[in-house]
Image (cartoon, rainbow, N blue to C red):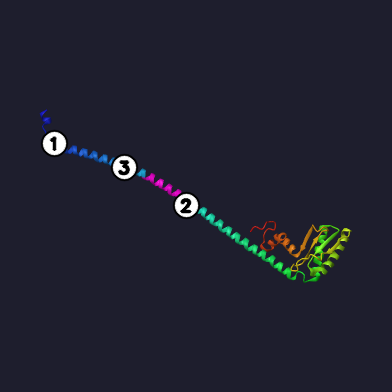
Amino acid sequence: MAQIHAMSDDQVANELRKMTAFIRQEALEKAREIQLKADEEFSIEKSKLVRSETQRIDAEYEKKFKQASMSQQITKSTLANKTRLRVLSAKQEVLDGLFEDASKKMAKEGTKNGKKYATVLQNLILEGLYALNENKVTLRCRAKDDEAVKKAAEAASKEFKDNLKRDVEVVVDEKERLPEESSGGIVLLNGTGKIDINNTFEERLHLLETDALPTVRVSLFGENANRKFRD
């Protein structure tokens, strides 16, 4: 027993060093273990943060991309509408100018050719006689057209009688006239004066603007004649 407890100072010091070294080694290993675990947890948390931030950035990018696409579509649609309106306006200006020129030319030259004008008057009167289909019809015209209208009325009533085998009395209203600035033509009234047919040049041109517009549009713009004037 005395030998077991009897250790020299050097032996004691050696044992202490061994114990100290062992404790230090355990401490280092524990520190390494803690460091590894900390690094692992840091790496996991870092991956989570990176994933989360990447998803946030992707979502923000997708949101901004959609906003940019929508803005681009709105801009494109707005530009297309503005262009369409400009084209529509330009086409309408062409059509307005065309019919305005026709109106001016009609007012200036429509009755210059007396023979041609007489034929036109006869046809306009005959058309009105067929439409009214009455025994007496009154005509209104410009005062300066009296003679031409009377001759045309005589020829028209004769043709009416030849075709329908009955007489029609056609008289010229010398009290109420068409304005002298009118381009020409006539207005027909039935016996009571309550029904009238406007066969003046102005009215025929107005009807032409509506009825012939599809054909005019095809000729000018190459558009579908059956389509309404939209663009």
- Which residue is rendered at x = 78% and y = 60% of the image? 197
Please tell me whether residue 55 belongs to the stretch shown in magenta: yes
Query: What type is the residue that disc 1 sits on?
Result: Val
- Disc nearest the viewer among 1 and 3: 3
Query: Which residue is denoted by mark 2 in the rendering?
Result: 64
Query: What type is the residue that disc 2 sits on?
Result: Lys
The 10 Å Cα crowd at callout 2, few under 14, some 14 to 19, many 20 or more, is: few
In the image, is residue 101 above or below residue 76? Answer: below
Q: Nearer the viewer, residue 30 or 17?
A: 30
- Which residue is rendered at x = 27% and y = 41% of the image? 31
SS state under label 1: helix
Q: Residue 32 in the image: x percent, y percent?
A: 27, 41
- Which residue is rendered at x = 32% and y = 43% of the image? 39
In the image, is residue 1 above or below residue 87? Answer: above
Q: Is 58 placed left or right of 175 in the picture?
A: left
Tell me the magenta residue range.
46-67
- Which residue is rendered at x = 74% and y = 62% of the image? 203
Distance (Cα) linking label 2 and label 3: 38 Å
Q: Residue 81 in the image: x percent, y percent?
A: 58, 58
Query: What type is the residue that disc 3 sits on?
Result: Ala
Query: Which residue is denoted by mark 1 in the rendering?
Result: 12
Q: Chief secondary structure of the magenta span?
A: helix
Distance (Cα) linking label 1 and label 3: 38 Å
Q: Is 216 placed left or right of 133 in the picture?
A: left
- Marker disc for residue 38: 3
